[in-house]
Image (cartoon, rainbow, N blue to C red):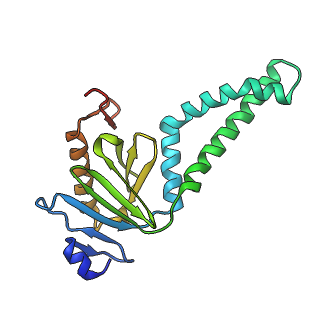
Amino acid sequence: MSDGECRANRCRVIGHGMAATADDATSGSYVLRYRSSRAEVWRWYWRSWKRKFWKLHALWAVVMVWPLSRMLFPIASPAPMLLSLLISMTLVVCVMACVPQVLFKRGERLLKVDAHGWYSEIGNASGSRSWREVASIQGSGGTVAIVGTNGHAMIVPRRAFSDAVHQERFLSHVLAWHAAAGVKVLPDGLISANKVD
């Protein structure tokens, strides 16, 4: 984004070719340009795994135990079943941990966020979601993660913002827009889509 484009979009270049809007209450939107790293995706994935994905992976591993034990061991006894559980859990965790890394796009992302939702471009790919299609918004570890109802997350690193105050304002606005779209706060403090219309 050139300086001229930045002025037209009320943003400023903040180093390494990234830009962020000078968010003022009248603009009601943010425009961010940044690159994510595989390490950020990895850290987000493992935080999410410890919080919730492990339950799903354990269920998949249990479902795989019987067919796997029958394929590997002709004798039905507890030892082969336990070994099959260990193998299936390892396979599920490894494969599922690789999925976000395979889907990772290293190009510069353009992210536009406003009261209606978000729009993103990265390379030739683009997408958008309304706030009602966002399951949660998480601010932790120096990043803001906007998690869709499909489980995919858009990770916005701290360097996408001019400073910590800008990041906090962004998070505050995003949470407010999300809540205004009919979402509720769960007891664990996460924001979740309200399924009741």
Toward the right, the furthest residue is: 74
Quarter placement of the N terminus: bottom left
Q: Report how many numbered discs are placed on residues in the image.
A: 0
Which residue is located at x 25 percent, y 43 percent?
Answer: 178
- Name the one closer to the observer, 75 or 148: 148
Is residue 92 toward the left or the right of residue 192 in the image?
right
- Name the one closer to the observer, 36 or 180: 180
Toward the left, the furthest residue is: 26
Percent position of residue 181, x then y: 23, 40
- Toward which corner of the image does residue 78 lie, by quadrant? top right
User: With respect to residue 113, does 9 lie above or below?
Assistant: below
Percent position of residue 6, x then y: 25, 76
Quarter placement of the C terminus: top left
User: With respect to residue 184, does 164 lie above or below?
Assistant: below
Percent position of residue 36, x then y: 45, 63
User: With respect to residue 176, does 74 lie above or below?
Assistant: above
- Toward which corner of the image does residue 70 lie, by quadrant? top right
Which residue is located at x 84 percent, y 18 percent?
Answer: 76
Percent position of residue 165, x then y: 24, 61
